[in-house]
Amino acid sequence: HPLDDYRDTLSCLLSISDILTGLCKDRQLVRIGGILTNTKRYTTKKGDTMLFAEMEDYSGHIELTVFPRVFYAHVSDLEPDCVLVVQGHVDMSGEDPKVLADEIWPMHEYSTSFYLVPPPDADRRVLWTRMKELFTKYAGTHPVYVKSDGSWRQLAPLYWIDGSREIREELITLMGAQAVRVR
């Protein structure tokens, strides 16, 4: 399947079925990933081009609307069978939910970032030592941000991680599910 190489990235994103089953509200900002199918270009009254398409992941498919501003910025990525990450707003105004695209990335260029909020009752020295061990074990290209004293700090590239399911699970075990966010 064309999405098989991107399972780790897709696991960090909202699934299309979450939108279709009503877990998202109207106008909620979402990030989904999948393969683009059934693309249809449309010319507006002003003569600009926009795109209607379907995006499909392992859980289902959803209509995607790409307005001219976003279309022109990403025209080369908007071909059938392209594997993409799309950020946009959910539109519940019609019969079926759809996503209005605000930003688009080719899946192979998309990199998730990790946002960690250490538990307030944790021994910071012990936690930092264990975090560094994990960062070394799972070294990679995904930026890591840690909330400290009320502000976010990006860690040096030396501490960036590979983004795998394993590192996510280990960070959740170490810090708790509420402390680990992936975007």
Image (cartoon, helix red, strand yellow):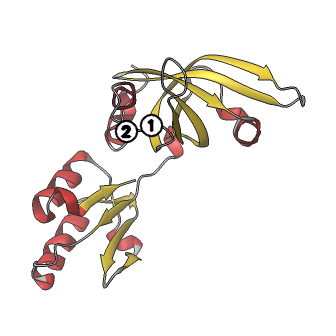
Q: Is residue 127 left or right of residue 113?
A: left
Which residue, as the protein is rendered here, is positioned at the far front? Answer: 93
Location of residue 46 (image quadrant): top right
Circle 1 residues within 10 Å: few <14, some 14–19, many ≥20: many
Circle 2 residues within 10 Å: few <14, some 14–19, many ≥20: some
Task: Tell me whether the residue at label 1 lies in contact with that at label 2, contact meaning CB atoms closer than 8 angstroms.
Answer: yes
Residue appearing at x 16%, y 78% in the figure: 120
Q: Which mark is residue 14?
A: 2
Q: Is residue 92 left or right of residue 80?
A: left
Name the kind of residue labelled 2 in the image: Leu
Instruction: For mark 2, give the secondary structure.
Output: loop
Q: Which residue is mark 1?
A: 32
Question: Which corner quadrant holds the N terminus?
Answer: top left
> On screen, 149 above or below 161?
below
> On screen, 159 above or below 108?
below
User: Closest to the observer: 158 or 88?
Assistant: 88
User: Closest to the observer: 158 or 87?
Assistant: 87
Location of residue 70 (image quadrant): top right
